Amino acid sequence: RKEVEQDPGPFNVPEGATVAFNCTYSNSASQSFFWYRQDCRKEPKLLMSVYSSGNEDGRFTAQLNRASQYISLLIRDSKLSDSATYLCVVNELNSGYALNFGKGTSLLVTP
Amino acid sequence: DGGITQSPKYLFRKEGQNVTLSCEQNLNHDAMYWYRQDPGQGLRLIYYSQIVNDFQKGDIAEGYSVSREKKESFPLTVTSAQKNPTAFYLCASTPAGRTEAFFGQGTRLTVV
């Protein structure tokens, strides 16, 4: 399957900072896009879906640019509890709707 | 409460042995998936099943086998043919018409 690329980080930021993660995907036929969060040694959990019009959930904003095959996640006013790995995820029809995961970007928010 | 249950949480296997990882869901989801995660790596698809009695190979199916005899259950067998089985194994499911996956808590398999 084609790739989903993310900057692995780590991103070390102070509390209250704004941080942005970027992701590119190579399969132009991809249909659905997500950001998942994974804590150390735990399962991934859905953070938010990503829509073409952009969407916001509290301090989190996701953007999708289909023409550039680019997805972003912005976290404002970072909290210590935001420390985790953020996975960019793309859905592809040719794998029975199985999700294709990037390797993740590690975020550490410090006091 | 509805969810996906994987067992066991930790599993140790001797080289040359087959071992089966359990995945059960009571969410009434049609599709189920098995992923493998290695340290510092993303999730890689092993097998998936969209309906009972049908399943398809993912990107790294060699050395693994699955069955889907019931909608609720999708066990994964790691065979002795899998050369490097030590990893974190994650089972997921998705409801019909949706693509967001829900994950079990994972099984850490270590070959000793």
Image (tube, coloured by chain):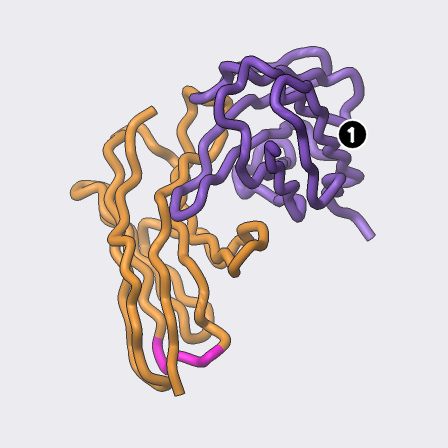
Chain colours: A orange, B purple
Residue B36: % across, % down: 52, 34
Q: Position of residue B40 (x, y in %)?
A: 39, 48
Name the residue: 40% across, 44% down.
A89
Residue A97 in view: no
Instruction: Answer left or right for A88 relative to A43.
Output: left
Is residue B42 something one can see in this rendering? yes
Q: Nearer the viewer, residue A72 or A79?
A: A79
What secondary structure characterizes most of the magenta part? Answer: loop
Badge 1 element: loop
Residue A52 lies, in percent from the top left, at 32, 49
Badge 1: chain ID: B
Question: How busy is the neighbourhood of tag 1: few (under 14 within 10 Å), some, or many (20 plus)?
Answer: some
Quick one: A100 or B61, which is closer to the camera?
B61
Tell me if A1 is positioned left or right of B53 in this view. Answer: left
Image-quadrant location for residue A68: top left
Instruction: Magenta stretch: give its range.
Output: A76-80
Which residue corresponds to the image point at 66% horizontal and 24% vertical from the top-left? B76
Q: Extreme left residue here? A: A68
Q: Position of residue B99 (x, y in %)?
A: 52, 37
- Residue type indicated by callout 1: Glu
* Residue A108 in the image: above or below residue B36: below
- Is A12 within the magenta? no
Please give the residue where the numbered disc 1 appears in the rendered image.
Answer: B72
In the image, what residue occupies the spot 42% across and 59% down?
Answer: A85
Query: Where B14 falls versus A45 (above or below)?
Result: above
In-front residue for pair A68/A46? A46
Q: Residue furthest right?
A: B1
Q: Is residue A79 magenta?
A: yes
